[in-house]
Image (cartoon, grey):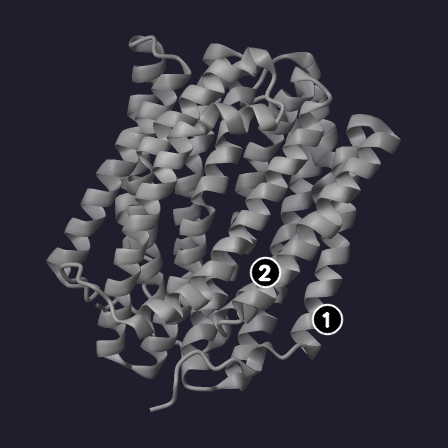
Amino acid sequence: MGDQHNFTSGNIGKQLVIFSGPIMLTNLLQVSYQFIDSMWVGNLLGGNALGAVAVASTVLFTLLSFIIGLNNATLTVLSQQKGKADQQGLKRYLNAFVVVLLFLAAGLGLLGFLLAERVLLILGTPDAMMPGAKAYLQINSIGILFLMGYNFIGTVMRALGDSKTPLRFVVAAVLLNAVLDPLFIYVFNLGIDGAAYATVVAQGASFLYGMYIVLKKNLAPFSIPSIPSKQEVGVILHLGIPSGLQMAVISAGVAAIMSVVTAFGEDVVAGFSAAQRLDSVLMLPPMALATAVNSMAGQNIGVENWDRVHKVARYGLIYTITIMLVVALLLVLFGEYGIKLFVQEEAPVAFGGEYLRIVAFFYPFLGINFILNGIVRASGAMYQVLVLNIISFWVLRYPLTALFSRLLGDSGIAVGMGVSFVISSVVATLYYKYGKWNTKQLFEKE
């Protein structure tokens, strides 16, 4: 357990760098699943196929939202237990999370498979993209348990202060995916289906390998699943439901924005999809820092060290704003070359490049949201973060994107999103400074 850190003492700035670095790399490797799929699909099968994968991935993320939300609750609960040095509490809550997530993954996987076409129709998926999008969504729904499993193991390890171990099984999965993608898509001539099969097989192998490592080295107190207590389930649901709804609000908001994009036709969908693939990489630094500050703040909240909690927030903000300004400059200069990694057609490349040039310097404001929401989430104030996300996506981002796209055409998509980033960062800052999130009492005092 040498890679597990105690964040209740020590140099915060140094700890944040050391802890967030492996998280960023792990997130980069996870994004590379879709990144590699997109490159092979876009280059071998064309822009329509890439758009089909992008639309299906949006729906898949919606299905995964409650599982990802429960992972956020896992990080909060277990990091506070770690800070309190409560080993029995760790074991009990870990068992309870496993049981809840197993049932949830099975149910959502079934819904995703059965309702795939209906949901894609609601999103206004172009007819030419429908068959591929449906197949991609259904295949990934079948393998949702594997995706949930290896993400959950990584979350547990990060809650315990270990961000290095998850790298090992994620690396294995990415390497396997990189080999299987061209094999299934091109050699076996499975097309979009092949990209989905490659991802599911790689995730399944990653999950099994991760469990092997954790159990062999006794890195976390996993046990044979047993029926959890009502109190444990109550805490999980109290945090997990609003946390899951947070992700549902986000993913549904992304789907709503995609419905705005699809109204402009296949070229804009393909260009926007390519830009979103790059966007998923650009957001890795603030996402990694947000995960790190969640765990670091959670451990300190567990021992009620509020001075260190606020220092964690300050360092997180300084780091994310600095990084995102540099990334934005690089994106303005070289973003169009990134678009060409996925599509070669002139019209999608033109739209994608313009989109990136407009939205690039709004990214630091989005990073502010990530960090401050991560701190608030660490306290267990999940309903408050839910409200902040509703404001961000449904009061600001989707309406502004729709409004500016009507006023400015397809270039208004980027303008609307950028303006929403600025306003939502102001809202998040005001709540962090004046809200009552730091009065949240997650566990009953013994």
Q: How many marks?
A: 2
Q: Which residue is the site of mark 1?
A: 430
Residue type at numbered disc 1: Leu
Task: Residue at 17% x, 59% y: name it.
Answer: 225
- On the question of residue 167 being in view, the answer is no
Q: Quadrant of the C terminus?
A: bottom left
Q: Nearer the viewer, residue 439 or 317?
A: 439
Quadrant for residue 6, please give it: bottom left
- On the question of residue 299 being in view, the answer is yes
Residue 366: percent from left, percent from top: 66, 53
Quadrant for residue 433, please give it: bottom right
Task: Residue at 83% x, 37% y: name it.
Answer: 404
Disc 2: CA contacts within 10 A as few (<14), some (14-19) or many (>=20): many
Task: Residue at 57% x, 15% y: name it.
Answer: 47
Q: Which of the marked residues, 1 or 2, is nearer the chain's N terminus?
A: 2
Residue farthest to the bottom, as pictured: 446
Residue type at numbered disc 2: Leu
Q: In the figure, is residue 66 to the left or right of 154?
A: right
Q: Which mark is residue 162?
A: none
Q: Which mark is residue 386?
A: 2
Task: Residue at 66% x, 30% y: name it.
Answer: 259
Q: Real-space Cα distance between discs 1 and 2?
A: 15 Å
Residue 89: percent from left, percent from top: 26, 76
Q: Secondary structure at mark 2?
A: helix
Disc 1: CA contacts within 10 A as few (<14), some (14-19) or many (>=20): few
Q: In the figure, is residue 276 to the left or right of 420?
A: left
Quadrant for residue 444, please give it: bottom left
Residue 397, above or below 165: above
